[in-house]
Image (cartoon, rainbow, N blue to C red):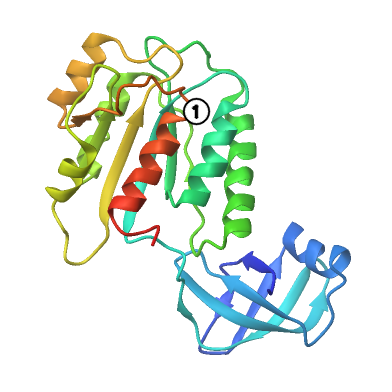
Amino acid sequence: MPHRYFTTDVWPKEGRAVLRGPDAHHLARVMRAKAGDTVILCDGNAVEYTATITGFGEDEVEFSVEAGYPSAAEPSVEVTLLAGYPKQDKLEQIIRHGVELGCRHVVPFFSRYCVAAPKKEEQKNVRYNRIAYEAAKQCGRGVLPDVALPLPNFGAVCRTFDQYDLVLFCYECGGAPLRQLLSAAPAPADRPLRIAIVTGAEGGFAPEEAAAATAAGARTVGLGPRILRCETAPLAVLAAVMTLTGNLE
């Protein structure tokens, strides 16, 4: 299977593209690619190109490209994971596996019962986005999912809810069945359904946070009789959403 790379330097009308930076170095120096080799280039907007190497420059690789085609790997729904900031490297797990399962955005946040505290978030965000980038390449995504800087409190989380068609607030005290909420969700004609999945950190949510989520338009969803860990819940719900919307078939 050809190697995959992301680049925005694609000119379909001219039939050419360029790959720059670390990925170009990896292809040219580590993979020892040569003229005539073929790779898959993704423009980050769910369009892929079969690209043939035509030459090498300093820190860049040049290609000829065929007509682009839609990525088959992108789900029919656009899912954002709003995840309570966990301890240690658990957020890295959520990002890596969330990208593999099809999420488009990851937005960490701090809330009342978070154990973790903000520390060097700009520096960590660079690493988090690199993890998302590598996961997207590995699993064949046609877009490049992103990881936002963390929101400072749950009020800031609630203020984002109007960006989505359906907000699933996952609460240990239970709620409506996920299948029911998805079947009743609106179906936009000109874009994918935008779904937000909101899960807590190790300490879960305070009652006032649950009330604020409902007041802001979120639908409370139960996750069955078991208490899921903070790194398990977002991935379990994401997998269920993808299954119920036909994106794991």
Q: Residue at x 35, y 51 (%)?
A: 242
Q: Visible in this render: residue 21?
A: no
In the picture of the structure, the residue carrying the numbered disc 1 is: 231
Which kind of residue does numbered mark 1 sit on? Glu
66 or 184: nearer the eye? 184
Number of callouts in the render? 1
Residue 230 point in image, percent of width and height: 46, 23
Residue 16 point in image, percent of width and height: 62, 85
Question: Would you say 201 lies left or right of 225 here?
Answer: right
Q: Residue at x 57, y 55 (%)?
A: 136
Instruction: Tell me: residue 179, above or below residue 1.
Output: above
Q: Residue furthest front?
A: 225
Q: Secondary structure at mark 1?
A: loop
Instruction: Tell me: residue 202, above or below residue 170.
Output: above
Q: Residue at x 40, y 45 (%)?
A: 239
Mark 1 surroundings within 10 Å by alpha-carbon count, few (fewer than 14), some (14 through 19), many (20 or more): many
Question: Would you say 6 lies left or right of 166 here?
Answer: right
Q: Residue at x 69, y 74 (%)?
A: 2
Residue 116 point in image, percent of width and height: 53, 14
Please state, as top left, top right, bottom left or bottom right, where the C terminus lies in the image: bottom left
Residue 115 point in image, percent of width and height: 50, 10
Question: Would you say 60 lies left or right of 219 here?
Answer: right
* Residue 190: quadrant of the picture: bottom left
Instruction: Tell me: residue 150, above or below residue 104.
Output: above
Q: Visible in this render: residue 128?
A: yes
Please state, as top left, top right, bottom left or bottom right, where the N terminus lies in the image: bottom right
151 or 95: nearer the eye? 95
* Residue 233: quadrant of the picture: top left
